[in-house]
Image (spheres, coloured by chain):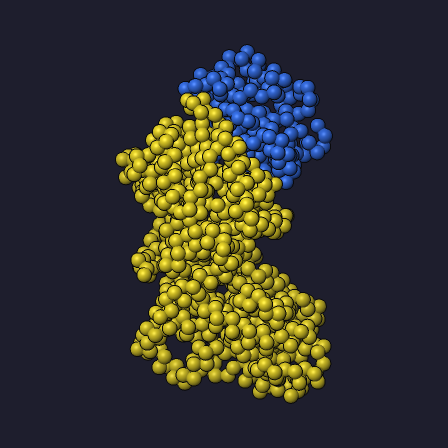
Chain colours: A yellow, B blue
């Protein structure tokens, strides 16, 4: 099976000081530049939709477009070669070199060439290959591997780079600054450019209609590689195709913004045939060869799930916002060629499940990547499906832990049953057992489970609790639907984070609604993230059936936990596309703070009756899926209305807990690193007026657990602060609620 | 200049400046020759330019002005071994984009591309009215010319740049370290 020892790799990366310095700052800077660039782009969402639609169409019509492209390249005087696999592509390019008598190649950055190990093939055929992208040049000198789609040496510090120059160029006088190092590389590489007879590039896009190669870059090495040598070979995956030049527009707008935060890169080369450049340094006729690589892409196209990976434009935006990537970099969270979440799908597609299985465990399916993807690729879904296939393949040896962690409800019930023995669970032997049997890392504190569930509490104060399908019809018929709100208690709210859920119920009631509590089946999120698709599908089916009668009557369904809510709004229909109930429920479900924002008049009225409050500075840490769903703004908007409350937010993409990720042995150390970084960030935050932070708020159960485990504050859910602000606290509401609660 | 053209010029200048390029608006071949001459003479080598002929330079008498100042003009096609030795390249521009400070250089097929990328300094001369306000507008114009048969282009936005080493921005990695755009208003030369 796996030839990699991921645990050791993770540990080494976490202990590598230059990586720990370079990767977090590099990814954060790039992510910030992207955020600024897209917020300045008014047509961003329209452009994304267009780009997505063009890719879908192009991949659908791929065989036909490849024919068109081939004819067009031939008509422009170039040659097209089709390669079924890596070996064939290498053979073709070596053969071109042999036939044209080429001995020295300059090459610009191309992940596709790394996928097929082209350099080794050419070198063994006697053709020298010089990588000319600055980062790739340093990688080549160091016999290292690139660790990021567009920033190949993001993992190297200044000292690392100087060391490479010192060792590999045999220089004692290596300059100190990036400027001087860059000039040194320019001089070295300029010589290679002028001597080369073969220029090798990838292709960002191929225009079928005209046979044109589009290359996007900043350094100018692509331009020199395509214009100086006698022969230009472009190696491109077949998925790079676009039907017409008009189709390029959204990609030209999106790729630079998403990748580097630029409006346009320094150079966009539009190359049709061999006429480009016509360097006076070249004797004789120039030639152009386009090598089209399949290597598993046609199989990916036929695969309903992996097909989406073919839309990737390799901007790298997903890696920059990926928390596990930020913690360990792309060598660890990546396969031989492709990194991070998108890399799981690509390695599964071009190499196979075994390769994907070597690192798929590092994706937490948090969805931050999908949110920033210019073509909206559903990376978390692809990861879940690849994970499910991996499970299937090694079914006999599946870790019981993944099944155990796939259903929080069972977990919580078990924890309650042994609750009285909780002292026992802290014993070393018990933690050892948990780790061995279920993969729960012994260093992670176990959650404290209160004795009373939310349902117990709600029932005790006279409310109606629906836990089973079929129990609904009668009571709905004899009850006025107006003013009724369903509070759906996810497993975490019902069993673990009961106080936050109580506050939510009280706030909804305080605004004048009657509350009906629905709880029961898991939403399927945990199962989904473990790749247990069948279990997730069953859970989704049960929950949809339970909630559908309310959705059908357009009764709002309000919940707390963003990861469970997004599972209902997004994933249920993906699990069962034909499940109409799931679709209907998805439309009716609201996160509590979104619900409050929708009823801001009622909230305003409730706030108006309250006495002024002292200044209170809070940090709000956004939950991954809450941010991706666009719900965080509602929390900010509601909190901003609370008198005296000043809100600052964190920049961390993810707290690092991500459901069960931080409990698992595989994830614990990365989780601890990310949690510690987040706690450090929060400790440095102040309000805009310089006030110290009074309280930390987070909407996710995971986030609150994580912050409590690695910091010294116990965060609350934002709804608890709202409850304080409108006086919907235990004493004031529970007494009166019994009178107004739905009668049985 | 119409107010729209003026607005485009201003926006273009801001955008290219922020990318590390420089811009000037000049209206006579004489003034242009003087400005380019001083850029050429700031280089260590004897005053010489690698250039690709373009109509606007002819119309403005730019070549005459430069020769009169003793600048050696070397067309790319005849440059031979000197191609890679000249420090300054001079080209025209088909289109430009105000929003992004971009120059669109196109041609079929020829040596024009090298003068924009091989030398340490690239000087581009463009007409104010060839500046489109934004990428979307420019793209339509570009697409029309592409469809009409002009199949090779480069879009240039600022000097060559890299941030590979510790994410620090450095200009002049493989292409020019400096990009000077001279914008010619409508009143200069025939239209």
Q: Is residue A561 above or below residue A6?
A: below
x, y (%) of residue A496? 49, 76
Residue at x 65%, y 76% (from the top left corner) = A550
Residue at x 62%, y 37% (from the top left corner) = B139
Q: Is residue A75 above or below residue A586?
A: above
Q: In the depicted view, which residue is nearer to us: A444 or A79?
A: A79
Q: In the depicted view, which residue is nearer to us: B143 or B21?
A: B143
Side of B3 relative to A703 (left or right): right
Q: Looking at the rendering, which quadrant does residue A600 occupy?
A: bottom right
Q: Quadrant of the N terminus of chain A?
A: bottom left
x, y (%) of residue A582? 59, 70
Q: Is residue A702 above or below residue A148?
A: below
Residue at x 56%, y 78% (from the top left corner) = A519
Q: Looking at the rendering, which quadrant does residue A249 occupy?
A: top right
Side of A432 relative to A375 (left or right): left
Is residue B69 visible to us here? Answer: yes
x, y (%) of residue A653? 49, 58
Residue at x 54%, y 74% (from the top left corner) = A490
Is residue B39 visible to us here? Answer: no
Q: Quadrant of the C terminus of chain A?
A: bottom right
x, y (%) of residue B151? 56, 31
Number of numbered discs overlaid on the protein picture? 0
């Amino acid at each position: 099976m796996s030839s990699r020892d991921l645990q050791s790799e993770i540990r080494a990366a976490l202990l590598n000081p230059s990586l720990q310095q370079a990767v977090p700052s590099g990814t954060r800077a790039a992510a910030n530049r992207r955020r600024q660039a897209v917020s300045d782009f008014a047509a961003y969402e329209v452009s994304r939709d267009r780009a997505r639609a063009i890719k879908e169409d192009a991949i659908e019509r791929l065989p036909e477009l490849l024919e068109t492209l081939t004819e067009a390249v031939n008509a422009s005087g170039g040659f097209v070669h089709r390669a079924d696999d890596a070996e064939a592509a290498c053979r073709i390019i070596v053969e071109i070199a042999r036939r044209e008598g080429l001995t020295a190649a300059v090459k610009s950055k191309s992940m596709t060439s790394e996928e097929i190990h082209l350099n080794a093939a050419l070198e063994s055929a006697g053709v020298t290959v010089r990588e000319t992208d600055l980062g790739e040049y340093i990688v080549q000198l160091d016999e290292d591997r690139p660790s990021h789609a567009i920033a190949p040496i993001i993992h190297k510090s200044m000292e690392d780079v100087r060391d490479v120059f010192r060792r590999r160029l045999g220089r004692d006088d290596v300059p100190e600054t990036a400027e001087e190092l860059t000039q040194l590389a320019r001089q070295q590489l300029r010589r290679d450019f002028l001597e080369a007879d073969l220029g090798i590039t990838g292709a960002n896009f191929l225009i079928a209609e005209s046979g044109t190669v589009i290359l996007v870059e900043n350094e100018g090495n692509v331009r020199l590689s395509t214009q100086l040598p006698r022969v230009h070979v472009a190696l491109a995956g077949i998925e790079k195709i676009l039907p017409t030049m008009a189709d390029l527009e959204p990609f030209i707008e999106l790729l630079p913004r998403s990748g580097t935060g630029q409006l346009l890169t320094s150079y966009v080369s539009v190359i049709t045939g061999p006429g480009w450049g016509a360097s006076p340094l070249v004797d004789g006729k120039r030639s152009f060869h386009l090598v089209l690589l399949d290597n598993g892409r046609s199989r990916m196209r036929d695969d309903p799930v992996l097909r989406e990976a073919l839309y990737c434009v390799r901007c790298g935006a997903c890696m920059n916002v990926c928390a596990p990537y930020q913690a360990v970099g792309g060598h660890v969270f990546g396969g031989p060629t492709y990194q991070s979440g998108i890399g799981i799908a690509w390695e599964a597609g071009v190499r196979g499940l075994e390769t994907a299985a070597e690192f798929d465990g590092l994706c937490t399916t948090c969805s931050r990547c999908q949110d920033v993807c210019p073509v909206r690729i559903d990376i978390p879904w692809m990861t879940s499906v690849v994970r499910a296939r991996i499970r299937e393949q090694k079914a006999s040896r599946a870790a019981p832990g993944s099944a155990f962690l796939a259903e929080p409800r069972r977990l919580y019930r078990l924890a309650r049953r042994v609750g009285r023995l909780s002292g026992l669970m802290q014993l070393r032997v018990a933690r050892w057992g948990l780790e061995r049997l279920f993969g729960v890392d012994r260093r992670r504190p176990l959650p404290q489970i209160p004795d009373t569930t939310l349902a117990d509490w709600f029932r005790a104060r006279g409310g109606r609790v629906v836990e089973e399908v079929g129990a609904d019809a009668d009571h709905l018929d004899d009850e006025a639907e107006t003013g009724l709100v369903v509070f759906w208690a996810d497993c975490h709210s019902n069993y673990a984070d009961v106080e936050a859920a109580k506050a939510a119920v009280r706030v909804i009631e305080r605004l004048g609604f009657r509350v009906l509590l629905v709880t029961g089946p898991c939403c399927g999120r945990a199962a989904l993230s473990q790749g247990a698709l069948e279990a997730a599908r069953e859970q989704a089916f049960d929950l949809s059936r339970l909630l559908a009668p309310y959705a059908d009557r357009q009764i709002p369904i309000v919940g707390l936990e963003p990861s469970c809510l997004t599972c209902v709004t997004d994933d249920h229909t993906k699990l069962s596309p034909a499940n109409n109930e799931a679709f209907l429920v998805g439309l009716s479900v609201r996160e509590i703070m979104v619900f409050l924002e929708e009823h801001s008049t009622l909230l305003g009225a409730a706030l108006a009756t309250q006495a002024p409050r002292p200044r209170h500075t809070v940090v709000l840490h956004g939950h991954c899926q809450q941010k991706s769903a666009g719900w965080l703004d509602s929390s900010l908007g509601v909190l901003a209305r609370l008198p005296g409350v000043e809100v600052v937010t964190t920049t961390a993409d993810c707290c690092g807990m991500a459901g069960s990720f931080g409990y698992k042995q595989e994830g614990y150390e990365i989780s601890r690193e990310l949690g510690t970084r987040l706690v450090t960030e929060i400790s440095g935050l102040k309000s805009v007026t310089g006030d110290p932070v009074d309280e930390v708020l987070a909407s996710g159960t995971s986030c609150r657990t994580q912050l409590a485990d690695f910091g010294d504050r116990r965060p609350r859910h934002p709804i608890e602060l709202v409850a304080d602000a409108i006086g919907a606290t235990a004493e004031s509401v529970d007494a009166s609620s019994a009178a107004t609660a739905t009668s049985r | 200049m119409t107010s729209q053209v003026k607005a485009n010029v201003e926006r273009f200048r801001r955008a290219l400046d922020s990318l590390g390029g420089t811009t000037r608006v000049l209206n006579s071949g004489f003034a242009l020759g003087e400005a380019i001459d001083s850029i050429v003479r700031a280089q260590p080598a004897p005053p010489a330019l690698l250039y690709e002929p373009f109509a606007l330079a002819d119309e403005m008498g730019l070549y005459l002005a430069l020769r009169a100042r003793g600048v050696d003009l070397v067309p790319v096609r005849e440059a031979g071994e000197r191609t890679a030795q000249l420090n300054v390249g001079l080209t025209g521009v088909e289109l430009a984009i105000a929003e992004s400070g971009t120059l669109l250089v196109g041609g079929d097929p020829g040596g024009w591309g090298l003068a924009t990328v091989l030398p340490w300094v690239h000087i581009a001369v463009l007409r104010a009215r060839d500046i489109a306000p934004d990428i979307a507008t420019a793209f339509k114009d570009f697409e029309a010319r592409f469809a009409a048969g002009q199949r090779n282009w480069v879009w240039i936005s600022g000097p060559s740049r890299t941030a590979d080493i510790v994410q620090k921005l450095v200009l002049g990695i493989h292409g020019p370290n400096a990009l000077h755009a001279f914008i010619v208003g409508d009143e200069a030369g025939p239209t």
